[in-house]
Image: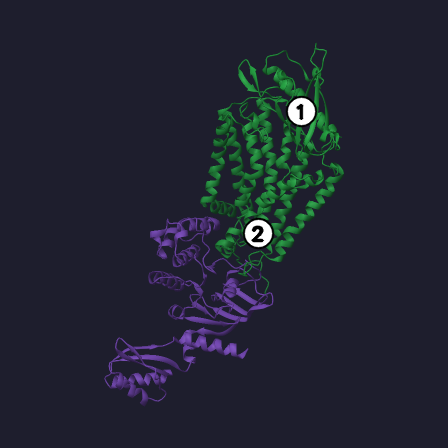
Amino acid sequence: MDTPPAVRARGLTKYFGEVVALDGVDLDVAPGQIHGLVGPNGAGKTTLLGLLLGLAVADSGTLEILGTPVGRALAVPEGVAGFVDGPGLYPSMTAKQNLAALARLRGDDAQTMNIDEAIDQVGLTDVADDRVRGFSLGMRQRLGLAAALLTKPRLLVLDEPSNGLDPAGKKHVYGVLTRLAADGTAVMLSSHRMDDVESLCSDVTILSTGRVAFTGPISKLASEDNELDYRVLTSNPAAARRLARQTNGIKLHDDDLVHDGVELLVISAPVPALDEFVKRLVQDDIAIRELAPVVSPLEAAFLALTEQQENNE
Amino acid sequence: MTAITADAPVARRVSVARGYRFELVKLLSQWRVRVLIIACWIAPALFVAVISQQASLPVDTLFGRWMHATGWAGPLVLLGFSGSWALPLLTSLIAGDVFASEDRLGTWRHLLVAVRSPRRIFVSKTLSSLTVILVMVIGLVVSSTASGLLVVGSRELIGLDGHLLSPGDAAARVLLAWLCALAPTLALAAIGLLGSVALGRSPMGLLLPAVVALAMQIVQQLPIPVAFRLALPGYAFISWNGLFTSPMQRGPLLIGVAVSLVWALVATGLAYFLFVRRDFTNPTHDGSGRLAITAGLVPLVVLLGLTTAVLAPVTGFGSGIDQDKVQRAVAVEFAHLYRLQTKQLNRADVTEAQLQSAAECTKGGDQVAARGPGNDWRCVISWHIPGVEAAGSAIYQLDINPLGRYVSDGDGPKEVNGFFLVRTPSGDEPNPLWQFDGNIELLPAN
């Protein structure tokens, strides 16, 4: 029997009074997929995540979660967990007490993961007995993730989970999400950090003013954009500049940067031209020390698509 | 939307029992709540113990003048204070915050995802806050009673009409008085729930029960029609006084309790109505919309009007205080207290019937009609002692407040009410006829 998609939405529309929060949103999230949701403020990301958690019901359209049609609020299937607008934690209780209270609320039979284990997974063992009142935003995010882990979710919905995370926290969270996905859990997360989405998600949905501007694999999004800005650090900037001018499809920017006393080239190029440029650098024995997009492909696509959609309105 | 199939594996909603325990854990994890509970179990004991040891007693508080005489006066003094201040504040801090705290912490969505039923969240929060309030009230009763009995002892209590209540009878009535006070406490708690739901993060939601209680106290001190007075949900904080007369003044007490319970039900119902209609997906909506005000405030004003209209034919439209009631109350109380004084002084017992006490009361020196509250009541009390031909008489100045409570300050024969203290075989004791408190039933005598 085929495994149903974790999320299948068709034509979801949601109004708040006269404001259209979601306008005909289609979305597919497969099991085991980490799916990013990006969009400018007010694009409808939190509203969409709220629908997935069952906090509200769409005014029109169909929504299936884990193969089950969802027709009314708070009636999503078992196996959906997560948070929107930050994790709900009670500051007067310790980290462990928060999770224990939540576990007892759901019932011991529903608990599939030990509280200590969940806390350990997100790297908060050292502060498990500290009151949440003193926690930083990043620690709260991690504890919120631990709370979601308690029920071993099959669909994990997270709103801005990387907010406030330090590098260590980010490593813990990424590790947990990657392991969950590897075990078949679908993860739907929103973020304003394009680098996070790019490094973590295989697929992305870009929302703009309640509509889907793009949905699909990130690789497809990057290839659809013809030209990106790159910065190039080489062992011989003058020679590299000359080669760039000679390569078809490469535009050389005048506003070159200086990094640690070394000149950085900034070029615009589609991927084939960039490949040709790299080939020539290597042929001329010029070492490439750094080659990176000035703006990430996702961010560039995000800006282009959202601006395009706003211009069309 | 596609209809959900009957066999869809929809996540189970959390039972009310689990939700109740969760809410209770959250409440008890707050240091403020823990401090309040501890204070309710300790502070009354200290208060009663300290006051009972002092030479100067709180004579302006009902039963305060008897705190040296019996341990049963302590819990009643505390009940008077609690009805005015402690219980409104406690209900404010617990029920007035139980919903608003989720707004403040931004945890509503988390809670909804976890419980999956706004109705069960409402029931759990309501029950848990009422439980904590009940624990606090029990603390007030147990602490003040235990302290009074340990420090002063279980002795006879002098009722508000001067008759003596045995320790057992006093215990039962003290307990009953506190039970009756639970009704207006529930009403205030329900108003707190309503404020907490309707006003969200606004501090006004937290303060609503205290503000309502203060407003009711102010209104109760005004010369308003007795029907309106009894229609206010806090009247049972006052009408428990009727338990300490003989016969008991059941009418105002039962009306007060019933009105309080109706307010508790209506306010809780309104809070529920507003809560289950709240849109938790809209982050800008914390309940403090126009609907919250109109659906919360207007129905309660209508309820007050309706209750007044229903009670008016029974209670009448006056103040409930007239010359006949004052004369009867003062004469009866004087007879009971005279008999008590006789016992204190080890004189030959004389019954109330033998005393044939009577009072003639006027108000404002006959310049005004003898009805209504005021401190210008003057009563001439006369009595007969078996074997003595001449009738005794004494004059008392009465200060009657709009609630029907009065303080009588006497001036008469020095052996009756000439001194503050009386010399008894066991030492000096307060003279019961020097100054005494009483209570006039505001309902018509028939």
Identify residue for label 1: B396
Q: Which residue is drawn at the image coordinates 62% and 19% (left, top)?
A: B417
For mark 1, name the chain: B
Q: Say which amino acid is labelled 1.
A: Tyr
In the image, residue B71 above or below residue A159: above
- Shade of chain B as shown in the rendered figure: green
In the image, residue A125 above or below residue B319: below
Hey, which quadrant is residue B404 in on the image? top right
Which residue in the rendered view is the most extreme toward the left?
A285
Q: Which residue is drawn at the image coordinates 52% and 76% (left, top)?
A: A310
Hey, which quadrant is residue A154 in on the image? bottom left
Disc 2, SS: helix
Which chain is in purple here? A
Q: Say which amino acid is labelled 2.
A: Val
Q: Which residue is drawn at the image coordinates 41% and 79% (left, top)?
A: A223
Q: Position of residue B263 (x, y in %)?
A: 64, 44
Identify residue for label 2: B197
Disc 1, SS: strand
Q: Position of residue B176 (x, y in %)?
A: 60, 31
